[in-house]
Image (cartoon, coloured by chain):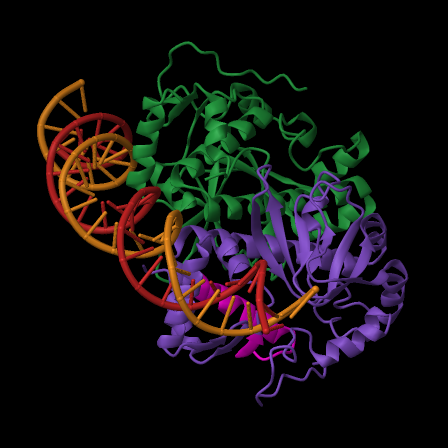
Chain colours: A green, B purple, C red, D orange
DNA sequence: CGCCCTCTTGAATTAAGTCAAATAATGTGG
DNA sequence: CCACATTATTTGACTTAATTCAAGAGGGCG
């Protein structure tokens, strides 16, 4: 396991409590996959030194994206996959009427743009939720390289498979669960993903607005706001604006149970 | 374009109006991808004769699945992808409580099991909605073969990419649209998929029950039933049990517009 | 032919949405 | 650094779309 440090529990200001841990920040100063704190999550998983060198050679590194800027837009020609290095992003489908449909939140180590392989154009857009940095991966070259590195080939397939699986669960959540269960589900999923990345599963900062959450879950902002209040009253969590501290993970899980 | 024949419009009984066209039935008598009527949709897309031979060699063909039987179950060890050859299937997540969450309907040419690549176990179950036949594709061998056939490698990635894209749209549909728009969206999507397979876009048979539809869309069966009645009253379609004839595709499309 | 299961329809209920308004954060220019 | 403007979030009151409950009709299968 890599030496991630979880945020300690001392009181801290909102500013200080960024989604990006000091460790990841440090890692992003360097240039190589091998030295990136995310190598256990991202593309390089399971590769040996020689293969990593080849992958490193492939990747354009460290484009920085300010908060609110697009990583890519739906309809643009697809050449690059994006590996989120630090920060976070939302992906969204944009409707002709200008309406935005948030379809996911991306965290460091996530790969963006996979749905564009078919059709050669991005099918969704991605917007940075905070200052973020990405690795740009020319897809065609990745495809070639993965023919010579079976481990890489398999890992790309695994990442795509995982995304399909995650989307299946989202469909089930959005179509079957109550508002309460949807929000509980999102919080637990985020908690788990933070944990996988070496952060605390109990305490984290949401980089997305209430309105982004509502949009993703198919609820009204007011409903999301009321649910946070309700969860606080039920002692399930503390929500100080974007900062969340989960107090009762178990009860939160039982809310998700689809017994209805 | 392959010589598909659309169902003619003369009156016919429900039995006669199976989802499986005579052409596909005929094709499935033979054994090779090259002679399968679905080769433009399924795995062999874009492959030359030599490559097709290799793919053919790989594929175990024609397991027949009676209506209601599982193609595979969530949790079972994953070794095979399934290409649906004829018939149709529903995929579902099963909850500990025994509750089933339908997450998709599969038609001939569709590939099933892609979400199992990560984790080596099927993550969902698939049940035949009518008597169906499948090609069993050993995944590891497909993976090896695709290292030597770039076109095959790319096509597998495309198929997975397309599935991710389709799931994104499902998330948007299920989380943002009214009941009316959700059903309209499903009908249009099915219509389109039938059309891609050489059937009529206007007239087709649904192999799934109202309850499966309701489950997928996150609605109550009663709501789905009422919506079919409403659509008939609005002259948007004729629905005689499972047999659907779309009368006004355009208005149906406008219902899906997410203006709300 | 008759039972069972699916589907349809009606009436009552409710979860979540909309509208409205207050409050809290954030940003901007002087 | 402060005053003001803007935007995000919360809370309350009311409305509504869709659910649930209940009951009846229609097909399909043994």
Q: Quadrant of residue B18?
A: bottom right
Q: What main secondary structure does the magenta stretch of the protein show? A: helix
Q: Residue at x 50, y 39 (%)?
A: A258
Residue B145 percent location from the top left of the image: 85, 54
Q: Quadrant of the N terminus of chain B?
A: bottom right
Q: Is residue B196 magenta?
A: yes
Vertical placement of A19 versus C20: above or below? above
In which quarter of the view is residue A182 placed?
top left
Q: Is residue B168 visible?
A: yes
Number of numbered discs overlaid on the protein picture: 0
In which quadrant of the rendered image does the C terminus of chain B lie?
Answer: bottom left
Q: Compared with residue A251, is residue A106 higher up or lower down, i.e. above or below?
A: below
Residue at the far bottom: name it: B10
- Locate residue B253, reporting x and y percent: 42, 70
Q: Taking the image as drawn, is residue A76 in sight? A: no
Going by the image, does A121 lie left or right of B78? left
Picture residue at 76% right of the left edge, 32% below the top: A46
Magenta run includes residue B24: no
**Residue A218: percent from the left, percent from the top?**
39, 47
Residue at image x 89%, y 66%? B53
Judged left or right of residue B252, residue A253 is right
Q: B137 and B245: which one is in front?
A: B245
Q: Residue furthest top?
A: A10
Give the extent of the magenta segment. Answer: B182-204
Identify which residue is drawn at 81% across, 43% down: A150
Horizontal and vertical percent position of residue A67: 40, 37
Is B234 left, or right, of A72 in this rendering? Answer: left
Nearest the camera: A53 or B222?
Answer: B222
């Amino acid at each position: 396991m890599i030496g991630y440090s979880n945020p300690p529990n001392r009181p801290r200001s909102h500013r200080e409590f960024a989604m990006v841990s000091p460790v990841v920040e440090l890692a992003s100063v360097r240039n190589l996959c091998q030295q990136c704190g995310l190598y256990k999550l991202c593309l390089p998983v399971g590769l040996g030194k020689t293969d990593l060198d080849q992958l490193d050679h492939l990747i354009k590194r460290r484009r920085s994206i300010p908060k609110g800027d697009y990583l890519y837009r739906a309809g643009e020609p697809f050449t690059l996959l994006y590996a989120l290095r630090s920060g976070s992003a939302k992906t969204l489908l944009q409707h002709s009427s200008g309406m935005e449909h948030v379809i996911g939140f991306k965290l460091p180590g996530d790969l963006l743009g996979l749905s564009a392989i078919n059709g050669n154009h991005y099918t969704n857009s991605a917007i940075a939720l905070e200052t973020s940095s990405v690795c740009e991966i020319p897809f065609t070259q990745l495809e070639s390289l993965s023919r010579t590195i079976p481990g890489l080939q398999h890992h790309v397939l695994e990442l795509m498979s995982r995304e399909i699986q995650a989307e299946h669960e989202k469909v089930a959540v959005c179509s079957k669960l109550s508002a309460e269960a949807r929000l509980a589900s999102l919080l637990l999923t985020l908690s788990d993903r933070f944990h996988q990345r070496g952060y605390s599963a109990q305490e984290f900062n949401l980089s997305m607005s209430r309105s982004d959450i509502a949009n993703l879950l198919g609820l009204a902002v007011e409903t999301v706001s009321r649910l946070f209040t309700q969860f606080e009253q039920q002692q399930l969590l503390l929500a100080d604006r974007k900062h969340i501290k989960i107090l009762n993970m178990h009860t939160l899980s039982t809310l998700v149970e689809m017994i209805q």
